[in-house]
Image (tube, helix red, strand yellow):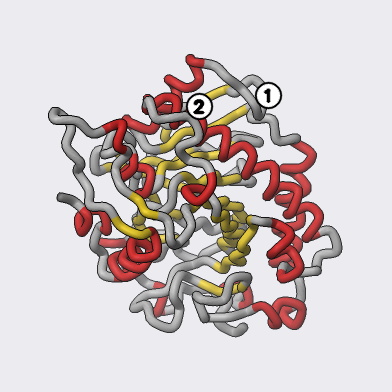
Amino acid sequence: MEKLISSRSNLHYVPDSYILPPESRPGNDTPLCNMVPVIDLGGELSFDNSSITQQIIKASQEFGFFQLVNHGIPKKLLDDVMQVAREFFELPIEDKAAIYSDDPKQGCRLHTSIDYANEDVHYWRDVLTLPSHPLEQHIQNWPNKPTRYRDVMGSYSVKVRKLGLVLLDLICKGLGLESGYFNDERSSVQKMAINHYPPCPDPSLTLGLPKHSDPNLITLLLQGETEMHGLQVCKDGQWFAVEPIPYALVVNIGHTMQIISNGKLMSADHRVVTNKRLARTTIASFIHPSLSCQIEPAEALIDDCNPPLFKAFEYKDFYSTYMTATHARVSPLELYKL
């Protein structure tokens, strides 16, 4: 538990083990980005609108990121889920000790950085990871403090999954795939990461998360804080801060979606910076295929003029490669290109 960066609130300097090599440091100045498309869903989770489909596909092709507003998840629930997430990290250390683990094979766990025991440099983040689908199989292993934690986080998990599946249906339609292509084992796993980034004495020296792309299909992120940005996206070799819009969800395309779309959609590099003034708490929801799912470019997108760009694989093999490649600073997509 002493590894948790939030347990070292009295630090007035960045420890050497958190200081990045000069070429990897974020520096001080990153422009605020207004290029990430903002898509208004009109307050409905179940929507069938060709204009919205076109906007999602265009954003996923050009940027790999977009923000959703009026997405149908109640603002009261979004306020509540951010509140219990913050309350969890404010609990006494003894209340969190039982679920702390450095073992990545443990499903529900509190840990710090990314792979604290094996990484060369640590990152300024504590995180609670939660398997969240099917909810009834996992919720009993979630923290039971704060008192409302399971009820509120569980309700949010169900709502955000419903939204995520609607987005997958629209992406399916926009790509011209058969209806239901992303159903069942291609989207059967959902995980949540409740990230906590405490204030940092010198944000120019370290990161909350390093440059990376996600391995899964899509990720839906609730930024929560609107006073201070932290998420940054790389576009044409330059980093831009993603504007925190109240009650919006940030959606990004993962590697698996890029492969299934045969490169039509893009998984974009992103990172998280820290700040001196405020602790930031965010909630990321990841929709994955099952580990045994066979992943390959969709047959409907392959013809003589558009040959497959990636090899076929079982998702468990790709995910293992992703973890190894990420440590080695190598793009896993390069290893699966034909």
* Residue located 53% across and 33% down the image: 167
Q: Quadrant of residue 240?
A: top left
The Cα atoms of the two marked residues, 2 and 1, are separated by: 14 Å
**Which comes before the other along the chain, label 2 or label 1?**
2
Residue beneath label 2, please? 38
* Residue located 42% across and 34% down the image: 33
Residue beneath label 1, please? 43
Counting other residues with Cα less than 10 Å from the Cα at mark 2, is it few (<14), some (14-19), or many (20 or more)? Answer: some
- 201 versus 213 height, above or below: below
Look at label 1 and name its amino acid: Gly
**Nearer-the-camera pick, 184 or 225:** 184
**Nearer-the-camera pick, 178 or 221:** 178
Q: Nearer the viewer, mark 2 or mark 1?
A: 1
216 sits left or right of 227 in the view: left
39 sits left or right of 149 in the view: left
In the rendered view of the protein, which quadrant contains the N terminus?
bottom right
26 sits left or right of 101 in the view: left
User: What percent of the width, then of the height, locates residue 174?
Assistant: 41, 24
**Nearer-the-camera pick, 222 or 172:** 172
**Nearer-the-camera pick, 210 or 292:** 292
- 130 versus 243 height, above or below: below
- 86 versus 65 height, above or below: below
Q: Quadrant of residue 122?
A: bottom left
Look at label 2 and name its amino acid: Val
Q: Which mark is residue 95?
A: none
